[in-house]
Amino acid sequence: MVAPEPGSSTTLANPGVSWLPDTPTPLEEPIFLMTTAAQGVSGFFVWTALLITCQQIYMHLQCYSVPNEQRHIVRILFIVPIYAFDSWLSLLFFTNDQYYIYFNTVRDCYEAFVIYNFLSLCYEYLGGESAIMSEIRGKSIESSCMYGTCCLWGKTYSIGFLRFCKQATLQFCVVKPLMAIITVVLQAFGKYKDGDFNVASGYLYVMIIYNISVSLSLYALFLFYFATRDLLSPYSPVLKFFMVKSVIFLSFWQGMLLAILEKCGAIPKISVADVSVGEGTVAAGYQNFIVCIEMFFAAIALRYAFTSKVYRDKRVDAQGRCAPMKSISSSLKETMNPNDIVQDAIHNFSPAYQQYTQQSTLDRSTPWHQGHGVSRTHSATSVRDTEKTLLLSSDDEF
């Protein structure tokens, strides 16, 4: 008796049993992602995005007149180079199955960093937690199903509300890197595969935890915007908020959609000559190619959302000259220092948080007159952050 071929649907003696392919038929011809054209097209968009964003970052560092704000802006802008170059590297090593997981670990960790920095930037725009509380404390939270605040009916804005917003974003900064490390470990032991929703695979559980964490983080970001949208209106927050949320959230749902398509059999594996690429890698390849193109448009949008023009009139050189390269490198080093994040995490997760709030204020020596800043001398020691602590009632919880 000759057994039917794996790809056939021949019916055996038992009419209720049929031989059907469990997986889509592998492609035996190279797909677009494997071609030089794909690498060239994606590379063009990536390097153009890098040039646009790096020039914008340079302009901010050159006119680094408001460090408390520009520190967060530069960190947010770095999402384009990291996302774009990481995705392009994954495409270059597309035929090396599973390599992309290690590349994407860096990208995935940075997105949590961006959400936190955007919220911190909004805090700086409004003058810190104390200044925000003086404006919104005691006001009733508007209940709206459309804005996701229906469950907060009857509650008022308090220091606990701000604490929740900060904690919800900071938890993502912890959960995302942790999930990335777990993914790498599971991958090393063969227990992780993109698009594999099997209960025995780590992919399902990583996606569940990640989805809950990122949704909570973005929800907190939205709650904060909903509460302070009138206060933030002079800073044109809509485009800023939309860009940060779309870059992170859309990339996540793109990946989820491709994983579902893979599971439905719409994305087959590739078997060409000596190269064999799994369905998960193919789906991730499409995701990386799309991200490479999207980052070009993101770079343009972020250029308008976080323009450096508003800081040019605050140049610190009395002769109106740009900052020297030494100052630019020092500013970049200060921007990359994560000490403020560590201190903020300790502050927001402290059991004694409910008894105080911190307001970061910039020690400035520049008076403002008729909307124009008077030039001042800039040095690494002339600008420093001071912390002011204001006592609040200990029962002020969200």
Image (cartoon, rainbow, N blue to C red):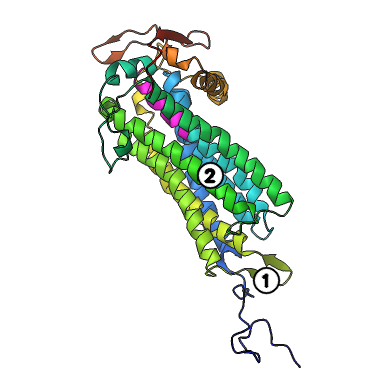
Quadrant in which the C terminus appears: top left
Residue farthest to the right?
A: 1
Picture quadrant where residue 224 is located: top left
Q: Residue 325 at what x, y percent from top left?
A: 54, 22
Picture quadrant where residue 107 is located: top right
Q: Secondary structure at mark 1?
A: strand
Q: Does residue 363 appear in the picture of this structure?
A: no
Residue farthest to the left?
A: 370
Q: Residue 364 at what x, y percent from top left?
A: 40, 9
Residue plotted at (49% across, 46% down): 211
Reading the image, the residue beneath label 1 is 271
Residue plotted at (63% across, 73% down): 26
> What segment is highlighted magenta in the picture?
115-127
Disc 2 residue type (three-letter): Tyr
Quadrant in which the N terminus appears: bottom right
Q: In terms of secondary structure, what is the magenta stretch mainly?
A: helix
Q: Residue 170 at what x, y percent from top left?
A: 51, 30
Residue plotted at (48% across, 41% down): 214
Which is more toward the observer, 273 or 323?
Answer: 273
**Does residue 137 sit above or below 199 in this rendering?**
above
Q: Is residue 302 magenta?
A: no
**Disc 2: CA contacts within 10 A as few (<14), some (14-19) or many (>=20):** some
Count of marks placed on residues:
2
Q: Secondary structure at mark 2?
A: helix
Question: With 372 as the anchor, is 376 left or right in this view?
Answer: right
The label nearer to you, 1 versus 2, is: 2
Disc 1 residue type (three-letter): Ser
Which label is found at residue 210?
Answer: 2
**Does residue 67 sit above or below 185 in this rendering?**
above
